[in-house]
Amino acid sequence: MRLWVGLRTGREEARIIGARVPPGNPEMPANPAEKRLVSARCVCYEPAPEGSTGVFAMADDGSIRPLIAGNWKMNGRRADGVALARELVRQARRSTRADLRCDLVICPPATLLTMLAEVVADGPVGLGAQDCHPLASGAHTGDVSAAMLADAGCRYVIVGHSERRTDHGERDEQVRAKAEAAHTVGLCAIVCLGEAEAERARGETLAVVERQFRGSLPVAATAANTVIAYEPVWAIGTGKVPTTAEIAAVHAQLRALAGNQMTDGQRLRLLYGGSVKAGNAAEILAVANVNGALVGGASLSAGDFWAIARSCP
Ligand code: PGA
């Protein structure tokens, strides 16, 4: 069995990072069934399903460590994908705690996953996919299962993105089934939801978001295996962004829903997505209950993505 542990990265830097430790590592405790302090460097550990990863979302002070996730969508060839991933890994590796106050994940198209898994391997940048099929295998031409994504080196998978909901008619039940499939193989599901422009105009935003939250989240969702991304459909790729008060209202509702539905809902990461850019990230990321961002267009530039990551409060 492979185990994943949290390592202290320095005396003053108490954040927990995910790191793979091979069996037989001297820091590995004899009994991996319980969490405990293992050594000065190794603060906790968790067994993880074979081939999957643990995801550490908490800073040591109990606050939620933000997540900045890049959704590359249907963009990237091998050469530019590798160059972009390499540059992010390089920047993240040389950054200090003051520079990097968030976790980073890139979600490239499926064709690049295995290649980029090697580029980011065991480093500070996580790898995610953009969708998965709810079933593990079978006659589903063109689809990729969550188990295959875990096998390819992913730690995350986006499910229920509005472009999937619109282009492929995905409904909440399918999104929930995909998130369950992700959990089964140890992937963290980034579950997307958000209202369309007409729904906002009709004053239905909070009702739509609540319906999607209740319908798209598996019963067994926890803060460790799930991230929510609130993405107003009308803000995606348009340059339009809700006001900070509008974002705060939705995120407050999501926090309340998470608190009611999940035992650790106060720790669930709630991302905002939709036209997040270097120029507006600091303002958005400072909004209460915004614990990171799902970034589309701006994630295709290492400089812009990095600037957004550095905007975390
Ligand atoms: P955008 O996309 O940042 O280009 O608006 C966000 C998303 O679709 O996740």
Image: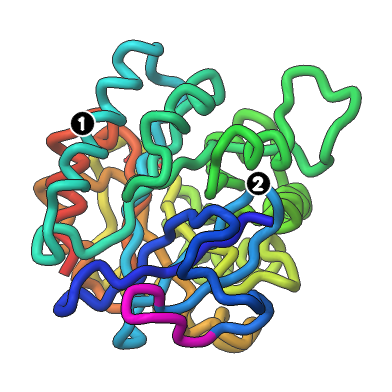
Residue 164 x, y percent position in the rendering: 60, 36
Is 8 left, or right, of 177 in this rendering? left
Is residue 37 inside the magenta stretch? yes
Q: Is mark 1 within 8 Å of ligand 1?
A: no
| Corner quadrant of residue 230 | bottom left
Amino acid at circle 2: Gly
At horizontal 72% and vertical 48% (from top left) the residue drawn is 178
Few, some or many residues within 10 Å of mark 1 (<14, 14–19, 20+): some
Q: Read off the residue under disc 2.
A: 51
- Element marked by disc 1: helix
Is 114 left, or right, of 133 in this rendering? left
> Relative to residue 12, is residue 150 depicted above or below?
above
Where ligand 1 lies, by quadrant? top left
At horizontal 19% and vertical 71% (from top left) the residue drawn is 10
The part of the chain drawn in magenta is 36-42
Residue 186 x, y percent position in the rendering: 66, 56
Disc nearer the start of the sequence (1/2): 2
* Residue 210 visible in the displayed image: yes
Q: Read off the residue under disc 1.
A: 87
Amino acid at circle 1: Glu
At horizontal 54% and vertical 37% (from top left) the residue drawn is 129
> Relative to residue 112, is residue 38 depicted above or below?
below
> Relative to residue 200, is residue 127 depicted above or below?
above
